[in-house]
Amino acid sequence: MPAACGTPGVRQGAVRVLIVDDEPELTELLAWAVADAGWQAFSAADGREALTMARGCAPHAVVLDGMLPDLDGVHVLRRLRYENARLPVLMLTARDALEHRLDGLSAGADDYVTKPFSLEEVMLRLRGLLRRAGAEPEAADEPVRVLGDLVLAERTRQVQRAGTPIALTAKEFDLLNFLIRHPRQVLSKAQILGEVWNSSFDSEGNLVEVYIYGLRAKIDKGRAPMIHTVRGAGYVIRAADDGR
């Protein structure tokens, strides 16, 4: 569940994201993605609560549904802008609500995503807003690992392949980072568990296989594969043009 202002679960110094939506399942999904990115999630189910939360929690960014049960999302946006002109706001709008999207942008929304949306797209857009606002560090002058056309920035946890950004969960990023630090080296499941999960648990289960499958679906989909299974031994990553 997203934290509430003033609760012991609020982390000092964390990037704070306020999610404003009256659909509990969607709010939980967004809150999970925000937490998985290493940020602190707060939530409000209506416009009045959102304004109260924004004043009390001082979020670094807001994800705002355009259709709320009390105050219209555009009205909430204008109030947020009046109280903090630089607060990044990402609006969620219905796919057929062109007029509403234009109203939101004219009222000061920094970006918008139409429903139904890709969670990865929301997180990429939100990260971009946070970076431009200075809440997330810039990618310049940070450790960067390159393998073929795959680029991984360690501090900002950004990944690109052939210039296309790829959104990963926190554990997917940790797994890829471990693999790319050992290119062309076969890594056993036990090594991966010990490094990425800092544990030997699930050594007989399929946790690693599940995460490798998910990582392949994002890194290798539609491209020459980089992540390979060495049957009975483990996994290896190598550049697509590396035949070894």
Image (spheres, helix red, strand yellow):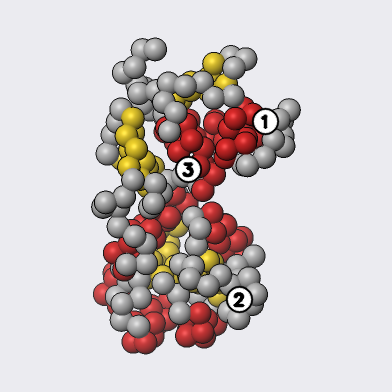
Among the two numbered marks 1 and 3 on one chain, the one whose residue lies closer to the N terminus: 3
- Identify the disc placed on residue 4: 2
Please name the residue that numbered disc 1 is placed on. 206
Specify few, some or many for label 1: CA neighbours under 10 Å numbering under 14, 14-19, or 20 or more: few
- Residue 64 x %, y %: 44, 70
Query: Compared to 104, does 115 lie above or below?
Result: above
Would you identify the image quadrant in which residue 161 lies?
top left
Query: Compared to 52, does 23 lie above or below?
Result: above
- Residue 96 x %, y %: 38, 60
Looking at the picture, which amino acid does disc 3 mark? Phe
Compute the Cα span from label 1 to label 2: 35 Å
**Quadrant showing the N terminus:** bottom right
Compute the Cα span from label 2 to label 3: 28 Å
Horizontal relation, residue 163 to residue 210: left or right: left
Among the two numbered marks 1 and 2 on one chain, the one whose residue lies closer to the N terminus: 2
Query: Compared to 171, does 34 lie above or below?
Result: below
The residue under the point 41% across, 72% down is: 60
Compute the Cα span from label 1 to label 3: 18 Å
Specify few, some or many for label 3: CA neighbours under 10 Å numbering under 14, 14-19, or 20 or more: many
Please name the residue that numbered disc 3 is placed on. 173
- Residue 159 x %, y %: 37, 42
Q: Nearer the viewer, residue 7 or 82?
A: 7
Horizontal relation, residue 108 to residue 28: left or right: left
The residue under the point 43% across, 55% down is: 123
Q: Nearer the viewer, residue 9 or 211?
A: 9
Horizontal relation, residue 111 to residue 23: left or right: left
Q: Nearer the viewer, residue 232 or 49?
A: 232
Looking at the picture, which amino acid does disc 1 mark? Asn
